[in-house]
Amino acid sequence: MTGGPTAGPAAFAAGQEEQEAARHLREQIAAQFGRSLHIRTLDTGSCAVCEQEIRLLSAPHYDLQRLGFFFTPAPRHADLLLVTGPMVRAFEMAARKTYEAIPGPKVVVATGACALGGVYQADPFVHGHVDAVLPVDVWIPGCPPSPLALLHGLSVAVGRLAEKVRGLTFITGEDGGGA
Amino acid sequence: MPLWFARGLRRGVVTTRYPAKPDGSAESLPTPPSFRPRLLTRDVVDRMIEACPGPALRRADDLLIFDVGACTGCGRCARVAPGSVTPSGEFELAATSRAALVKTIPILGDPR
């Protein structure tokens, strides 16, 4: 939100400038990532159920490739880093090196409740969430996120679908009008 | 040139758009809870927070702060307060800001 009741025309113009910049950025992302996108997965200490769901994406039922998404074994060929797990401290350097090896522009997607800080608290062994080490662009909740949730998240990451969660209240009944 | 390939080139998407129809298995997925504010009291909320295995729920006076990102959809809060908490049915929850996943739910069940 920019510009409250006390904000003058200058703040309004700044808001417009910001919106213009955001629109330009979205167009750039669509141009860069709109056609095909290569994904490198990174497991920072997950229980491997997120990996199972990610693997399901390339099954015929979900058929990830039809949307122009492909898995790549090397970060140097990747556009998007799909990170699972609570970021074990022993893995921190490997995670940083993987991130640095990806050519820009790049997108980091934190996947699953562990990566979002919902399972492990920060302690001497884990950071507890992926944001502590990598600059996350998109967060996909779920324990594990289903392949459909992952597909939606990837589409949000490349700007093909709008995020839904902003409009959800998680209130049932007369107070919120449904979740 | 196959038709699907030509269509993909034109649209900039390789073959087709994101699922054209809803997936049949989607209804059976575990999903984060949805709350009924009028049935929530501070007591009930505190018991739900105790039952929650993670940091997904916390309370600030008359507000329940629900972190959707931290929720594993285990359903323990729903077991503590069966009528006032139901599965939301929402699983496409990807967000471009972490703050968008934190929801505030008013607690309206306490007598005023």
Image (cartoon, coloured by chain):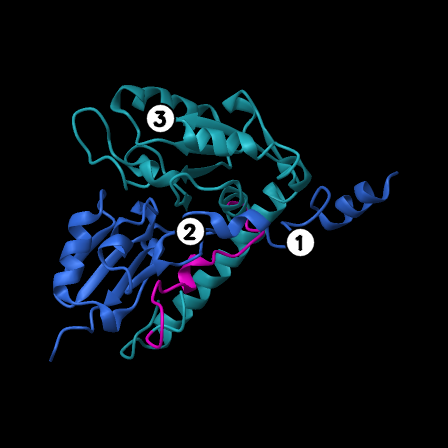
Chain colours: A cyan, B blue
Q: Where residue B38 sits in the image (x, y, percent)?
A: 24, 73
Residue A164 is inside the magenta segment: yes
Discs 1/3, front = 1
Q: Where residue A20 sits in the image (x, y, percent)?
A: 50, 61
Q: Which amino acid does label 3 sit on?
A: Thr
Helix, strand or loop under label 1: loop
On whether disc 1 and disc 3 are found on a single subunit, the reply is no
Horizontal relation, residue B101 to residue B58: left or right: right
x 30%, y 29%: residue: A87
Quarter the C terminus of chain B occupies: bottom left
Calculate the distance from the C-alpha at mark 2 to the C-alpha at mark 3: 21 Å
Q: Which amino acid does label 2 sit on?
A: Ala
- Quadrant assignment, res A35: top right
Query: Is the residue under label 1 in contact with that under label 2 (CB below 8 Å)?
Result: no
Horizontal relation, residue B19 to residue A104: left or right: right
Question: Where does label 2 land, which residue?
Answer: B95
Could you say which is closer to the camera, residue B7 or residue A13? B7
Q: Is residue A131 above or below residue A91?
A: below
Q: Which chain carries label 3?
A: A
Q: Where residue B44 sits in the image (x, y, percent)?
A: 16, 61
Q: Which of marks 2 and 1 is nearer the N terminus?
A: 1
Chief SS of the magenta region: loop
x 43%, y 52%: residue: B93
Q: Where residue B106 sits in the image (x, y, percent)?
A: 23, 69
Calculate the distance from the C-alpha at mark 2 to the C-alpha at mark 1: 22 Å
Can residue A39 be seen at all in this image of the molecule? no
Question: Where does label 3 land, which residue?
Answer: A44
Q: Which chain carries label 2?
A: B
Q: Mark 1 lies on which chain?
A: B
